[in-house]
Amino acid sequence: MKIDMNPLEQGDRLMTLQSALVHGRIGRRDFLRMAVAGGAALATAQAWAEELGDAAITQRYNARKLAGAYDYIVVGSGSGGAVVAGRLAAETSASVLVLEAGGTDQLDAVLNPLMWPTNIRSERDWGYSATPSASVNGRSLILPMGKVIGGGSSINVMIWARGHKNDFDFWASETGDDAWNYRNVLEIYKRIEDWQGVQDTSRRGVGGRLFVTDVRDPNPIAPAFLQGCQSVGIPVFADMNGEMMEGQGGAALANVRIKDGMRRNLPSDYLWEVLKKPNITLLTGAVMHRLELSGSTVTGVTFEKDGELHTVQANRRVVLSAGAINTPKILMQSGIGPAAHLKEVGVKVVHDLPGVGQNFQDHILAAGCVWEYETVLPPKNSAAEATFFWKSDSSLDTPDLQPFQIEVPYASEVHGPAFSVPNNSWSIAPGLVRPKSRGQVRLTGADPSAPVVIDGGFLKEEADLKALVHCIDLCREIGNSEALRDFAKREVMPGPLKGDALKDFARNAAGTYFHESCTCKMGRDSMSVVDGSLSVYGIDRLSIADASVMPRVSTGNTMASTVIIGERMADILIG
């Protein structure tokens, strides 16, 4: 008997069943029966039962039989770590240990695209915040980072933004390694993507492992937003990651990682299938304490799980993929970083590497410009379905602005109460994706449990504030355009502010895109932490494969460009 339920209820039911199977709460036979009754096709249910059931059994065994040594230890299972670990396990016979501080990704809050905001400040978020800063009127901006299998790819908004052509050519110039240039990175994208949108054989791949689509059945406000962009001179493109990101920019519906109404995080395509193999162990709840070294050679790691310390040897290499806050934290806890700072907090210096924790960057996403709906419309996909890339100054070589049209109200803790933002609203969030401001990550003590201090550097450079103010004006012009008039009962905020009042609004509106990056940059200068092959300078058998290695943050949401870093790391290790 098939159970009648609406599509959202059906999706939630199937997510719950998958989680129960992975955790061993139900067997395969019961899973098949209940999944089919819940609306899944038999063939689909059988595939889920085999993949998730085998993986669960193997990983439970491997976790109980933790070995003393592995060929590779990968710290973090996010957009970089999942790629590295999954490819090593699938394409070699090497033994791989993946250490993830968080827990399972088989949860409704992760799998349901519209539930992504519930992950922020939950147990699936490390809960970091920047220190209060005068440049954002004394506010402390939150810095969510995924503490869950899949890392940021499990808690973000699922946007697949490749980055601009100039980003990768800059990375190649900084490292002196042409493997990072756009032409070569484009071949990786074409290899890994299974693009569902308008065909573009010179730029998009079909048949790869990563399902990528433009948003389907969008809220009508999303295409209207594109018309509004066009009315102010921003051209509209069929694909946000094609020709548009090789030139001056433009507007488009978003590329997303949503399939059959469910999030596709990176482990779903790189890890879940290989977790059936005996040569990979994914250990959750494993919090890194330090790298183990013999002289300048990394020999293994020490981590804590369930209150117990474990030291495990790495026969070939440790790859840090813990993110732009935790990766420099782990390095500094292990004595690798700026010598003066390490001595200041009581850490024995193993290797003076001054760039560790420096060069912190994140995109600004301001909250924002808000209109009250004329007739309320339900959000679709991830509730952020249309965007544009544009320049605040025509002399720039790359777009520095990326607002998103958001189908729900989006206001800061200052502006929400001040403007009495109603629930029946929609937003355009001004975005700055080429910030000039820089921050840093520092330790407060030698103990691994001691918190880090994060100076986000947000809007410290006057040029960033100027660009954000320009973006607010541009977003207001679009939101008040004829194309969006049928959707707007009234403009809620900011209204026609000018001069210092608008700057003050921008400082109180500023938040981040949750794209923390650049704290262990690759390059060849004295502040570089890794070389073009992602090996840590001065330390043997240690690499980094996450957004911290970006010398300059990529233009747009950083998940896709971090996958490229993971792919490059895997190519280097596998040869």
Image (cartoon, grey):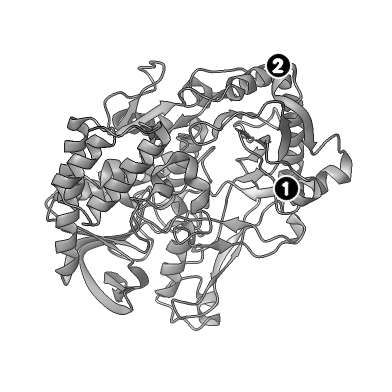
Sort mark 1 into few (<14), some (14-19) or many (20+) by Cα contacts within 10 Å. many
- The part of the image, by quadrant, that contains residue 481 is top right
- The part of the image, by quadrant, that contains residue 298 is bottom left
Q: Is residue 233 left or right of residue 309?
A: right
Estimate the x, y position of residue 31 in percent, counting from the top left.
20, 45
One can see residue 475 in this view: yes
Estimate the x, y position of residue 268 in percent, counting from the top left.
29, 43
- Seen as rendered, the residue at the extreme bottom is 346
The CA distance from mark 2 to mark 1 is: 26 Å
- The part of the image, by quadrant, that contains residue 369 is top right
- Against 218, residue 128 (above or below) is below
Badge 1 amino acid? Ala
Sort mark 2 into few (<14), some (14-19) or many (20+) by Cα contacts within 10 Å. some
Q: Is residue 90 left or right of residue 114?
A: left
- Against 293, residue 3 (above or below) is above
Front residue of this view, candidates 39 and 327: 39
One can see residue 250 in this view: no
Give the SS element for disc 1. Answer: helix
In the picture, the quarter occupied by the N terminus is: top left
Front residue of this view, candidates 221 and 74: 221
In the picture, the quarter occupied by the C terminus is: top left
Badge 2 amino acid? Ser
Q: Earlier in the sequence, mark 2 or mark 1?
A: 2
Q: Residue 509 — which label? A: 1
Which residue sits at x=51%, y=80%? 445
The residue singled out by tag 2 in the image is 231
Q: Is residue 214 left or right of residue 503?
A: left
Give the SS element for disc 2. Answer: helix
Estimate the x, y position of residue 288 in percent, counting from the top left.
36, 70
The number of callouts visible is 2
Which residue sits at x=14%, y=48%? 92
